[in-house]
Image (spheres, grey):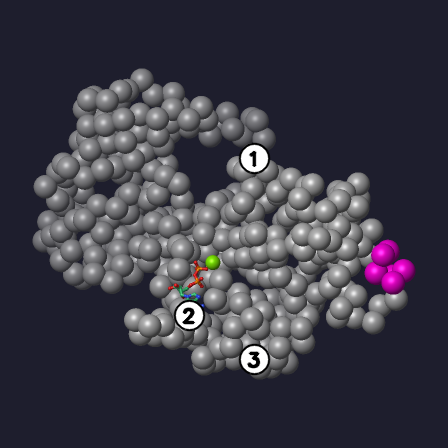
């Protein structure tokens, strides 16, 4: 097992239209045994970074180290990594057993009976013992992906590299494999770099997530750090579904308010000293906005804004309510059953403590929500009753 150090990694591709900077001076240290998820929109440089770690791409600048060994110029087969791809990349003419043992036969001197033993152990771990004699075309997508994962695990590498391995599976199987992969990774304790464009996978699977955009590192942190303390507007908007609401506001330092044509809200006390510029972006997560029945008696009356319901979307467990605030949209989610429908005019509460503020130009965070990153353990049923 290895610690992976990415040191000012830069990768430029030459293309007919000019060079493309796919990864721009990326710095990151991945701990031994850690499960790190690279997440970001399509084209942000996730696969390129992974392929550089694997040795499938030469780097333009910077260095890669496994523990203290510089692997920057090593060939893929010298690096002791195993890679799993979205498209499985199984050999069609080989059985599952042959697919799983092939790499070991080619790259090690292990005796055949030991290879067989390892393949069988791994197949059992992956629940695919019964499929070992089958060729890929006889297997479902989920089974093929298990064989591809098994083929990686059987090699017992220092580092697992996975590029969107669950993207071809249907939603239900994907959710199941997410949990299984996490369990497997923690049992095997192998340093794992996992690439996905899916923020749900990132939020639920990673010890830490690495958010990329345009080849540049946006933030590294635990999922909840990145969710509750986003470094900038990009991270804030990328993590969470429905996404964080953003409202452009003008700052009036004399009146100490943030306003636009539809509302005026006091500048949160904790941010008064930090709001320099005249324009900010106010961010508020849908789960922190709530409908207000009686505005007259509300505890934070100057944090209410008027809105009109556009559409409600009952999801079963929660309801999403889409609102219009002076021409801008605002979404709230509630786990209560709300008796509202399109056209209703309502007051909604935007609590000062949960507001995020971003510099309107750079997108840098100026103020975060006070939401705890490590919430206290959920109390038992009696505790729930007290909280309600
Ligand atoms: P992601 O995996 O995050 O979707 P990639 O790492 O595949 O993104 O791509 C990052 C950028 O590099 C994109 O602009 C992509 O078009 C470009 N790119 C990737 N591979 C190549 C290549 N072989 N040649 C030229 N450009 C490439
Ligand atoms: Mg990719």
**Apparent side of residue 146 relative to residue 39 in the rendered image (left or right):** right
Residue 323 in view here: yes
Q: Secondary structure at mark 2?
A: strand
Image location (x, y in percent) of residue 311:
27, 26
Q: Residue at x 24, y 31 (%)?
A: 323
**Apparent side of residue 263 relative to residue 114 in the rendered image (left or right):** left
Q: Could you say which is closer to the camera, residue 291 or residue 309?
A: 309
Q: Quadrant of the C terminus?
A: top left
> Above or below — where is 74 with respect to 101?
below
Going from N to C along the chain, the mark reached first, 1 or 3, is 3
> Above or below — where is 19 with respect to 87?
below
Tell me: is circle 2 under 8 Å from ligand 1: yes
**Apparent side of residue 184 relative to residue 275 in the rendered image (left or right):** right
Furthest residue to the front?
93
Magenta-drawn segment: 112-117
Distance, label 2 to label 3, CA atoms, is 15 Å
Task: Tell me whether circle 1 and circle 2 mark residues in contact (CB < 8 Å).
Answer: no
Membership of 208 in magenta stretch: no
The residue that mark 1 highlights is 172
Task: Mark 1: give few (<14), some (14-19) or many (20+) Cα within 10 Å.
Answer: few
Distance, label 1 to label 3, CA atoms, is 39 Å
The residue that mark 3 highlights is 72
Q: Could you say which is closer to the camera, residue 254 or residue 289?
A: 289
Image location (x, y in percent) of residue 107:
75, 70
Going from N to C along the chain, the mark reached first, 1 or 2, is 2
Q: Residue at x 55, y 52 (%)?
A: 86
Name the dominant secondary structure of the magenta segment: helix
Q: Which mark is residue 23?
A: 2
């Amino acid at each position: 097992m290895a610690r992976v150090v990415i040191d000012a990694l830069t990768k430029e591709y030459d293309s007919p239209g000019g060079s493309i900077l796919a990864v721009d001076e990326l710095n990151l240290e991945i701990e031994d045994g850690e499960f790190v998820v690279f997440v970001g929109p399509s084209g942000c440089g996730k696969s390129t970074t992974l392929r550089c770690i694997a040795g499938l791409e030469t780097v333009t600048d910077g260095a890669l180290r496994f523990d203290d060994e510089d692997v920057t110029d090593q060939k893929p087969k010298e690096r002791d990594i195993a890679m799993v791809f979205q498209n499985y990349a199984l050999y069609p003419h080989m059985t599952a057993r042959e697919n799983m043992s092939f790499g070991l036969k080619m790259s090690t001197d292990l005796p055949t009976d030991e290879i067989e033993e390892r393949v069988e152990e791994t197949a059992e771990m992956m629940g695919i013992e019964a499929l070992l004699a089958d060729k890929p075309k006889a297997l479902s997508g989920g089974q093929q992906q298990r064989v591809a994962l098994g083929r990686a695990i059987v090699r017992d590498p220092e580092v697992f590299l996975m590029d969107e391995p669950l993207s071809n599976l249907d939603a239900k199987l994907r959710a199941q494999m997410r949990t299984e992969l996490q369990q497997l990774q923690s049992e095997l304790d192998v340093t794992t770099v996992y690439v996905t464009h899916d923020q749900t996978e990132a939020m639920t699977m990673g010890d830490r997530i690495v958010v990329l955009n345009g080849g540049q590192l946006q933030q590294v942190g635990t999922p909840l750090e990145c969710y509750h303390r986003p470094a900038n507007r990009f991270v804030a908007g990328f993590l969470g579904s429905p996404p964080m609401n953003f409202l452009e506001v003008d700052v009036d330092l004399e009146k100490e308010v943030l306003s636009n044509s539809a509302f005026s809200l006091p500048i949160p006390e904790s941010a008064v000293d930090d709001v320099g510029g005249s324009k900010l972006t106010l961010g508020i997560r849908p789960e922190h906005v709530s409908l207000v029945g009686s505005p007259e008696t509300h505890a934070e009356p100057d944090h209410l804004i008027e809105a009109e319901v556009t559409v409600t979307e009952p999801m079963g467990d929660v309801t999403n309510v889409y609102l219009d605030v002076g021409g801008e949209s605002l979404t709230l989610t509630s786990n209560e059953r709300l008796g509202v429908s399109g056209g209703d005019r309502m007051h909604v509460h935007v609590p000062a403590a949960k507001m995020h503020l971003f510099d309107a130009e750079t997108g840098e965070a100026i103020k975060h929500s006070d939401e705890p990153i490590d919430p206290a353990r959920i109390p038992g049923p009696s505790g729930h009753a007290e909280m309600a």
